[in-house]
Image (spheres, rainbow, N blue to C red):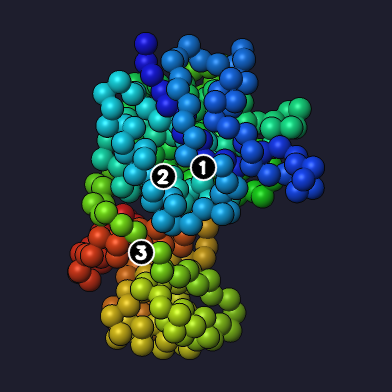
Amino acid sequence: MTRIVVLSTGGTIASRYSAEHESVVSNVAGEELVSTLGPLAPDVAVAAEEFSNLGSYRIDLPTAFELVQRIGVLVSDPEIAGVVVTHGTDTMEESAYLADLLLDTEKPVVFTGAQLHADEPDSDGPRNLADSIRVAACPDARGLGALIVFGQEIHAARDATKVHASRVGTFASSEHGKLGEIDAGRVRLQRRTIRRGPVETGRIEPRVDLIKLVMGSDAAFVRAALENGARGLVLEAFGRGNATPAVTEAAIEAIGRGIPVAVTSRSPQGRVEPIYGAGGGSDLASAGAIFCGDLSGIKARILLALLLGSGADPSTIRRRMELHGN
C-alpha cells in the first residue's frame, strides 16, 4: 500500500482556543490531525511526524529551510510515496515555494492547512488534509513540484498566493490558474507545470528585504535596509517595474555596492519589463537591477535568499532569477 507522511508544523489547522492565552493557539499534534479524519480518510497508509507547532507568522527563513531539508530526507526514503505538510496559511506559499526550488524529487510534496481552527464545527482542516493525502498518493501528481491543496483545488507553489485573510477559499493562482481539483474524492489534473531545476545550496541568506513602493516613496527604506546589513533587496515596484526617482537612485547605489536588487510588480498579475525612463524601470535595468518576470515579490525574495545562500556569483543570480521568473 502507498505510504504517505504527514509532517505537521502547526498553524490554524492545528489550533484550538487556549484559556491560558485567552486566544487561539497552535497546540494540536500531527497524529491527532490524522486520527480525526474519520470517514474522510483516504485508503492510504499514513504516518505522522511533528516538525514544529507554530503559527506560520512565527516561521522565519532558516526554520523554513530546515523544514524543507527534513522533507528532503523523507522523500529520499523509497518506502514513502509523498509528503503532506500541514502549515499555517500566513506564510504557506513561501515555505511551499522554498520546497519547490530546493527539492529534486518526482514525489508529490503537498502543503495544506485551514482557515477555520480545529474547534470550529465546520473547520476546513480535515477536508483539506484528506484531499492533500489523496493528491500526495496520486501517481499523476508526480513531477509537478511542490503543491498547495486547499478548498478542493490544486495549485503550483510558484503561482499560488493567499488572496483572502479569512475565507476558506483563500489560495488562488490568478495569473496561470489552478493545476486541477479534487472532486468526489478523485484527483483531476488539467495542466502541468514547467520545472526550472532545483537550486543547490546548503544554506539560505535571511537578510533579503522586500520593499513595497507607494506613491511618493523616498529612499528611506532602501537605505535603512542597507544600513542594517541587507544582502539583497527586492523592490515591489509600480506596474511594469517602475520606481520613484528617489528609490531608483538608492537602488543604483545599492547595486554599486554589490547588493543585488530584484524588481517585481505590486500588481497581482502581469510581468515586469524595463520600458519607462526618467527614473523608471529602464533606468533600474541599465544600472543592473534584475527583472523577475511575473514572480511575486515574496517569491522573488525566497529565490534570491537561496541563490545568495548558495554563494552564486552575480551573473548566475541574474540568470537563475530571470529563468524562474519567465
Q: Measure how far apart labels 3 and 2 are at the Cα level.
A: 15 Å
Q: Is residue 236 left or right of residue 151?
A: left
Is 5 situated above or below 205? above
Residue kind at label 2, given as amino acid type: Leu
Q: Residue furthest front?
A: 20
Upstream in sequence: badge 3 or badge 2: 2
Residue kind at label 1, given as amino acid type: Ser
Is 247 situated above or below 302? below
Label 2: element kind: helix
x 59%, y 27%: residue: 33
Foreground of the two, 139 or 3: 3
Residue kind at label 3, given as amino acid type: Glu
Image location (x, y in percent) of residue 187: 46, 22
Is 134 situated above or below 111? above
Residue receiving disc 1: 52
Residue receiving disc 2: 67
Image location (x, y in percent) of residue 138: 39, 21
Is 208 situated above or below 74? below
Q: Is residue 239 left or right of residue 276?
A: right
x 30%, y 20%: residue: 79
x 58%, y 76%: residue: 214
Q: Quadrant of the N terminus?
A: top left
Foreground of the two, 188 or 200: 200
Upstream in sequence: badge 1 or badge 2: 1
x 43%, y 57%: residue: 61
Q: Measure how far apart labels 3 and 1 are at the Cα level.
A: 21 Å
Image location (x, y in percent) of residue 264: 43, 66
Image location (x, y in percent) of residue 15: 66, 38
Tell me the quarter of the picture where residue 45 sits.
Answer: top left
State the mark number for residue 205: 3
Is residue 175 in view from this perspective? no
